[in-house]
Amino acid sequence: MVSDSMPLAIHKSPLTVIYEWLATADHKKIGIMYIVYALLFLVIMGIEALLMRIQLSHANATFLSPQVFNRLFTMHGTTGVFFVAMPILFGFGNYLVPLMIGARDMAFPRLNAFSFWMTAFGGLLLYASFFAGDGFSQAGAAPDVGWFAYAPLTAPAFSPGHSTDYWTLSLLLAGVGSIGGAVNFIATILSMRCPGMTLSRMPLLAWMNLVMGGLVLVTISPLTAAQLMLMVDRYMSGHFFDTGAGGSVVMWMHFFWIFGHPEVYVLIIPCFAFVSEIIPVFSRKAMFGYPAMVAATVCIGFVSLGVWAHHMFTVGMPSYGNAFFVLTTMVVAVPTGIKIFNWLATMWGGKIRFATPMIFCIGFLFQFLLAGLTGIMLAAAPFDWQLSNSYFVVAHFHYVIVGGILFTIFAAFYYWFPKMTGRMMNETLGKWHFWIFLIGFHLTFDFMHIPGLLGMPRRVYTYEPGRGWETWNMISSIGAIFQVTGILIFVYNLVQSYFKGPVAGNDPWDAWTLEWATTSPPPDYNFAAVPVVRSRRPLWDIKHPDDPDWKYE
Amino acid sequence: MVKSGLKFWGRRVLQLAVPVFCAATAAIAESHGGGISPTNIFAPDSTPANSLYHVSVFVLEVLGAIFVVVFSLLAYAVIKFRQRKNDDDFEPPQVYGSNQMELAWTVLPVLIVVVLFLSNAQVIHRVQDARRPEGAVDVTAVAHQFWWEYRYPQYGFVTSNELHVPVSDPGNPTPTFIALLSGDVDHSFWVPRLAGKTDLIPNHPNSTWIDPQEPGLYLGQCAQYCGTQHAKMLLRVYVQSRPDFDRWVHEQQQPAVSDPSVAEGRALFVAKACFVCHSVRGTPAVGQIGPDLTHVMSRDTLASGSVTNTPENLRAWIRNPEAFKPGSRMPVTELTDKELDQIVAYLLTLR
């Protein structure tokens, strides 16, 4: 029988606890380590952003030198993609997938631990660069080539010293970690589902992590290959990207974006997973159109591999080349947009409860809609010839990453924190967090589109007065202060709730998937007896024996 | 209850900020003219920029309609289907899907994609594959860290940082076709009111074309991160009437003014190695690494548009380029005050 009470507290010495965490291969502990690691880097990249927004708040500011600014935007982007977004999503996936499919752990627990530590060390190596070169106050020898490190800016002639090498090597390490994690997701989801859980009965979160895993396997290799070629150029007299010797810098762009575009789908698909679990529970309705959601996700996985050169519309590809990528990019918007309709239809006719996880998902819906539409503007190559490399693009991708990804990550925190710690987070603080962060997000990123439309390029440490950009930049900078406040409230809520939050019990949200069938937090073995399921919502079946899902699916 | 009322109205107000900013965008879109900004992409004054503008407005209209519809549906659902205080405890009816609805909302977006794709493909072809008419002016732009070199092969001279082109009459077009090359890393040529941006990539020649219809000064800047001073690699395009343009060409074709009163400065220009990087046509200075200075005083700005061209600024720039443009490629040259005065006096004659 599953008990609602907290597990018995056994006194352990601090060293024992530390050793347990460092040496663990348990998916739950590894998941939490990924999440905490990513949260620390989220705070750091927020500080980087705040510094940049102060510098950009007025024209010709001198708060930061160009050298420091250029290192900051490079580090901010690289950290955000590789050491915040990917780890946090791998963390939630690691924690939840075995629980939601009724398994005892991931398929390869030690590979899991290895993958986490590779990623973790990669991040530490990248940040070691701040302390190299001229030292921390000058931003050290941190890379300053942009997160996509276009050749030939990374050639020894234009990037002397080792700053580019910190970029290359830390991402090589993290890439190994990502591939290990992806292998684990795929093997676990395909082979370790509990009895009765066919592929068509597993939670959407499992499906989406499966697709994400497959995408990671395919997409990391081009980046790794390009980075190895770059090292050969830099240290072994190679000429892959050396145009003076017949090399091609456009080739770097192709390799990078063949990685880079599917990468952003790697980031968003697990977020779709969170939304697909949370919205049904708080609308009190089953997910509308489960098969279409699966099909759309798989479709996105495949089509996203064929859109990369929409990042290169201004590079001088022939007109038919540009047109091809316009078409594929617009096509990938169709399954993505359909999901919004499915979530809308799930809420339709429901009884929506506005708990904190749900309001973050609702914010996501509006914001992801807008982000998707600005993405279609960018897919229109003639429009992109104006918008590319401007602040419109910066606004668009932050709309997706902050307004989309981060909002759903907040939702996931509030929803699954009770399961992970056994305590509820504070709802009042959660609402404060939501509203203050929402105001800050919209102040910063809504108005950031406008300087892009008025000709402001990106990656500029300052800008000219008299171009109509100053007011909008100032508004964006003010919004950053609200966002920082919101995040501070969130961190306080996390810490305070961990120690003093009300006891959650197994199933505080009255939800329907298997993770809520065990204690909060789950025992090491997850389930005392292997669950057997007959439908997509096993707990709905238990709670509604007269009206179970398997009669209708 | 007040609290839940605040939640819904609060959300509606905040989510209305989005349509407000869309309206602001639309206002900018309709603004036509440099009133709001001299680099406004919605104020085109050249055929390629115009083509981009028209298809962009069409795309905005379609997407705007989609936004209004879906936004309204979301807002309606969030308000209408919220759990109310006096609700019973029963779960609502469970609806697992609807084939008709799902088919409809797949087919309709596909049709929209087809329309958007075809309208964009047409413009891509029209702009990228445009034929070069007989009377076109040719310029070769070579981008460097962090300045622009302009060669006029038809007229036999080279200048820097300020591009002059003739105005083009739609009835009898005289566009300027610009070949885009790079001397070092990737850059991008972006003058929003004249054309979309095109990159300058080493060993990958590109080209763009403009046919501005109103004389005036058009601004822009490098739009591909190229290193420390990417932000100060500004663009200035002077569109002139045909007579003014021809006069400017004639002036630029002349070799450098040879004023005997600044002979010491001219000698120092060589002795202090300025000539290694800079050219002054008609003298032994034939350096290719920095901007051509033959007619430097005919320009309004120095340091690629970032500094006004006055004697004080010229002097300060030579004394210490780092103070204006930290990370610029021009080194600090060891000069006494007297030597600096002489060199500046020399440069001031290069009109």
Image (cartoon, coloured by chain):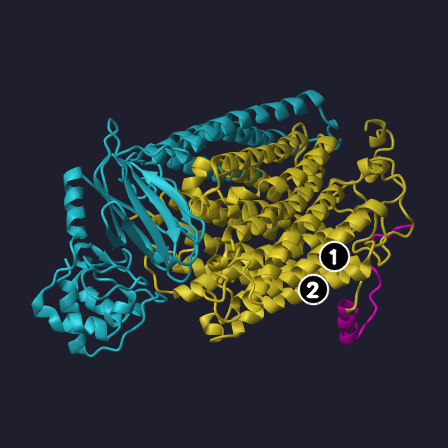
| Residue A299 in sight here | yes
Q: Which residue is mark 2?
A: A118
Which chain corresponds to the colour cyan?
A: B
| Residue A423 in sight here | no
Q: CA distance from mark 2 to mark 1?
A: 9 Å
- Up the image or down, A259 lies above or below B83; here it is below
Is the C terminus of chain B in the top left, top right, bottom left or bottom right quadrant? bottom left
Q: Quadrant of residue B303?
A: bottom left
Q: Secondary structure at mark 2?
A: helix
Q: Position of residue B258 (x, y in %)?
A: 11, 63
Q: Is B58 colored magenta in this rendering?
A: no
Q: Earlier in the sequence, mark 2 or mark 1?
A: 2
- Up the image or down, A62 lies above or below A192; here it is below
Q: Quadrant of residue A175?
A: bottom right
Q: Quadrant of residue A490?
A: bottom right
Specify the amino acid type for callout 1: Gly
Q: Identify which residue, A354 or A273, lies in the foreground.
A: A273
Bounds of the magenta segment:
A1-22
- Up the image or down, A2 lies above or below B262; here it is above
Q: Position of residue A275 (x, y in %)?
A: 66, 41
Q: Are marks 2 and 1 in contact (CB under 8 Å)?
A: yes
Q: Position of residue B117 (x, y in %)?
A: 51, 29
Q: Is A11 colored magenta in this rendering?
A: yes
Find residue B93 and name its label.
none
Residue plotted at (43% across, 28% down): B58
